[in-house]
Image (tube, helix red, strand yellow):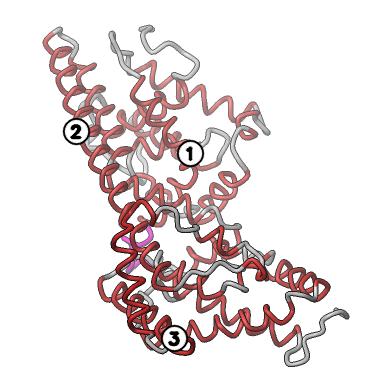
Amino acid sequence: MGVWSHPEISLEELLKLIKGFVDILILASGYQSSGHFAHWDPLNIKKAFQWAIFFEDVFKRIDSDQDSVNELDAAISELTSNPHFPQGLTHLSSATLSKARIFILEHLTRALPMRDSHIKAVLKATIEMDLDELQRTEMNYLDVYIGKLKLQNEEGIMDFLHIPCSDDILHVKAEDDIKIDLTTFAIQGIKKRQLVVSCVSSIEASVDVLAKTITQVNLNDGLLQEQQNHPTAYVWNHWRTRAISYLLDKRTIRLVSGASMIFSAPKVQWVHIFERLDMSKEANANFCEAIELLLVGCISSRWNHIIQHFMSNSHEQPLSISTLYEGVHELILERFQNVDPVQQKEHSEKEQEIIEYLEVKLSNQILHLWEVSPALAAASLPPWSRLFEVYANELLSQFKGKITKIRCCSCIDDNKEHIECEVVERIWCLYMFHVSKNKSCYNVT
């Protein structure tokens, strides 16, 4: 650091203020560090804009000094490369901070959830900021502002779509300043938000219809097979329907979305998130949901493939129970024969990190795997993992009638064979996902 030439503030002091501004941006995204909603009122939003104006003024003064700009960007790059730095703000730079008001307004209009009170606060603050600025240059500033609003209303959605997007605005240099008022950008952000919400609602409705249709079709197919004297096929068709219903469920899709976001961060960050959760015995529900989210995170990038795999597996003739058992048993033996199996290399580093974390969390609480969907457990546990071995061995032991600590059916107590119980359903899911990839599902052995 030797070329910084701003006379009123040192680079070290500016970096401290930038860190404070990052905290404001995090709050502007809708949540406090505790996980509670971040409440924004017009006064606090205007205070945030004052911070933004300060940065804009600083960067206007150093913009002509390329050496100072380069040194600042190098310092910001070092700041954002820290694994603890918020991943959603890694594109922070002198260019984005030179448009700091737009930068913070972008986060305010994307806040989750965006409540009515929040929208009103954003609009009130932006209107007051624009009026204050117009008042410095226009005698009839109120008429000028109302004229702009009328023009926006007349131009409608088509011209709204031609307003430069936030990325365009945030990455232009100061000398190419785009004249766009805060109210215009706020309206743009809120309208885009409405369009996104509408699209998401349509997608959710479509997925719901798809899930119900698949369920109905599978049930009808099952009834037909039952009429053809294949009761086992009917049971397995029912399990297949349950697996697909879970994978397409609205709650599950939201878990997939949340997992994709959480695990896009470095391991040190997502581990920190889970370590802060209450996973005590008193908060058993929290622990179970955390385990489910971790399992979903293992396969979130392959979710569509997993749905397609379960949908494509059907049985014109049912496999024997012994075939399921032998297939899964053989898979466990292969694990012992391959200390570093090729399958492990097929999984991303991120998936392996999650599995390693799960193995620690479930070391003495393996029973929680029986509290998640059989389809999720089967698809998310790779055969090379210790968790898969423990989970599959426990199922096979129960199937053989051995006394175990975990009991998920009463077949042994009732002196019945395992045919339609949860033990066979979970073994069936393991077979369908891991064994039938390389074997024909239609051969009876």
Q: Residue at x 57, y 62 (%)?
A: 87
Residue under numbered circle 1: 381
Indicate the quadrant containing the N terminus: top left, top right, bottom left or bottom right. Answer: bottom right
Residue under numbered circle 2: 212
The answer to whether marks 2 and 3 mark residues whose Cβ atoms lie closer than 8 Å is no
Residue under numbered circle 3: 138
Query: What is the spatial separation of the Cα atoms under label 2 and label 3, in whole angstroms?
Result: 60 Å
Near mark 2 (Cα within 10 A), the count class, few <14, some 14-19 or many ≥20, is: some
Tell which circle, 2 or 1, labels the residue nearer the N-terminal end.
2
Region in magenta = 280-287
Where disc 2 sits, the SS reads helix
Q: Residue at x 42, y 83 (%)?
A: 129
Nearest-to-viewer mark from 3 and 1: 3
Query: What is the spatial separation of the Cα atoms under label 3 and label 1, in whole angstroms?
Result: 66 Å
Q: Which mark is residue 169?
A: none
The answer to whether marks 3 and 1 mark residues whose Cβ atoms lie closer than 8 Å is no
**Residue 114 falls in image quadrant:** bottom left
Is residue 84 visible in the rendered image? The answer is no
Residue 197 x/y as whole percent: 30, 53
Magenta: main secondary structure: helix
Q: Nearer the viewer, residue 220 or 343?
A: 220
Where disc 1 sits, the SS reads loop
